[in-house]
Image (tube, rainbow, N blue to C red):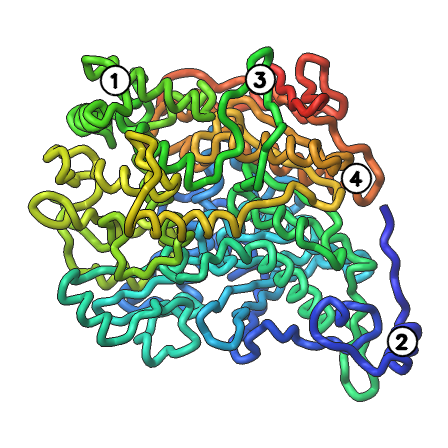
Amino acid sequence: MTKTTISAAVASALLAACGGGSDGSAALNSGLPNTLPTFVVKSSLRSATYDGSTDDLLTAGLGATGLASATAPTFANPASPTAPELRRAAIYNNYRALVDVSAAGGFGTLYGPTIGTTSTTGKVAGKEFIAYVDNGTGSQNVTMMVQVPDSFNPAKPCIVTATSSGSRGVYGAIGTAGEWGLKKGCAVAYTDKGSGNGFHDLQSNKVTLIDGTTADANAAGTLAQFRAAVTDAARAAYNAAFPNRMAYKHAHSQQNPEKDWGLNTLQAVEFAFYILNEQYGTSTVNGTKLRTVTPDNTFVIASSVSNGGGAAVAAAEQDVNGLIDAVVVSEPNVQPKSTAGLIIRRGSTNVPTIGKPLVDYFTYAGLYQPCAALAVPNSPGFSLLGSQTLSANRCTALAAKGLVTGATTAEQAASALAKLRAYGWESESDPLQFSHYRLATPSINFTYTNTYGRFSVTDNLCGFSLANTDATGNVIAQVANTQAGLFSSGNGVPPTSGVNIVFNDSVGGPKLDLLGVSPSTTLADYSFDGAYCQRALATGTDPATGAALTGPIAALSQRVQQGVSEVQLNGNMRNKPAIIVAGRSDTLLPINHHARPYFGKLNVNGNAANARYIEVENGNHFDAFISSPLLGGYDTRLIPLHYYYNQALDRMWAFLNNGTPLPGSQVVRTTPRGGNPGAAPAITKANVPDIATTPAAANAISFANNTLVIPE
């Protein structure tokens, strides 16, 4: 593929002929004046230059060694950290949240800031620009950021999107798409997609600002990253009944920001073009900058992982103006609108359940995972994070509702595990089910049932709220110093940095959800009643009887399902070259509900000519879990999916720049490190073979007769 360029003389001629331009896609044309997009809040725009030594774009001055260090950056005054301190800590924490930084896991040998460069530190000099995108009300305040490395070449411009994964802040993709783009000399267009790590402490009325510092909500006004849409009087009444509670942006903005994730990613690209032309555009005699870096001469790769990957795919589907040239995503949260007629076959067996919406399969997991854990001996994390008693109580609660079969706890656990497999999880996920429940499932269910239904923080949906808790699970006041650093340590989906999920309806009073006692069972069963409610909202039916909901809860469910309908994808990326990477052991986003059915949908729709699907054995959703001391056994079982995400980006780069053929869709056969849990031997290239250009027949993924066939 080639991109055209335009000379300064031609640009000036075009300006004279056209008389300027307007915001939006038309303003991206060569030769038009470079104007700030109207969706950017001008007063919020700020920039900084980093020398690549004391501070930098990729590692915040820490270098690869500092990112790998277990010692986190500190604040001179923990009660009032500065914006630069918060930025440094945010980069440190967000990088480590997505990448395994252990040497044994491959950091520094297979991947990392120094790999593929001549730098010995991984530091990247350049400029950083941050601003809000808003509709004029201050209620959206989506954070956008553009990083322009000093190595950027305006004669061969490129942009990589790095939309945040999860509900993370704007630095959420710094270690994934951000790192790869910066090392290639590309500008990187980031966005927190309106679901970033913004909180509102309802008790103290504190909120987060764009730089991570905190302020009184009334003083912050429209500059708050997020403020709950609650009047002071209503907030006071809520505080009286439920003191010390928190609101979070993704859950409580009442805007269902996911519906705009594709739009936000496209806006980040437009913002990047504006910034690049301010830096490199041709200057006229009166000082006006002309657009000379344009979609016609710039390669744009939409990329990221998880939720950010889903946003990149959504952007490609919505890209009517041709801003995006290619898509590379890993473990993307993609929710197809329909999989009618599509069959997914692994080996010789058809997968029974495919393409369910996220809130559907997560609320299913929220019911069954705690019980199913008892059917898997030596599940990573269970000995440190689990409880035989609480899991057995969950089995009892499920059995009482007829949701599992069996007379004994062991039989009930086996029934729960079988249900998870039948609902789309592969057997490779069995040992990972409990750790995902303990560290992820309740937070996703809390966030997404709230956000899809556009519920207020004061609704206490399904009896849940957010607060700090003590060692016994009781609600306590916010810890001031922890809260001051939440921008850098939080992930936007509590539990995070001291903010936990509380089951208000627990027998005896509000309790940490993991210790909640359900009114219907009088058991400490991981707040079964709340999980049951969430499942009902997701499906519109009673989980036990299958009967349609009636009355007030039916109306609540309809709100949730309306929100889901707003975020589902068509399966049409406009035939853009695309590589989708996913791990077969992904337990958070099981591949039968996202990567496989979306790729299948592309094929059904006839839009897969330039798309490829790479399924990696022994790859899971959380590379950072692999080296966690809490999860011994991840290291022996799993390989870093991040390594293959980088490979996919490299293969797309070679295709765009040199015409090198894309690899065929395939299963990559990796070899786990083995050894003892918590002490697996160091990974080598033998564990992680490269993506093959032409896969062997036994590894090739094929599609025919509406059937996506995945080799066993």
Q: Earlier in the sequence, mark 3 or mark 4?
A: 3
Q: Earlier in the sequence, mark 3 or mark 2?
A: 2
Q: CA distance from mark 4 to mark 1?
A: 51 Å
Count residues near mark 2 (Cα–Cα under 10 Å), then give few for <14, some for 14-19, many for 20+: some
Residue pointed to by mark 1: 412
* Residue mark closest to the camera, 3 vs 4: 3
Which mark is drawn over residue 14? 2
* Residue mark closest to the camera, 4 vs 1: 1
Position above or below: 399 against 16: above
Residue located 42% across and 68% down the image:
225
**Residue 659 lies in quadrant:** top right
Count residues near mark 1 (Cα–Cα under 10 Å), then give few for <14, some for 14-19, many for 20+: many
Residue pointed to by mark 3: 346
Q: CA distance from mark 3 to mark 2?
A: 56 Å
**Residue 295 lies in quadrant:** bottom right
What type is the residue that disc 2 sits on?
Leu
Residue pointed to by mark 4: 655
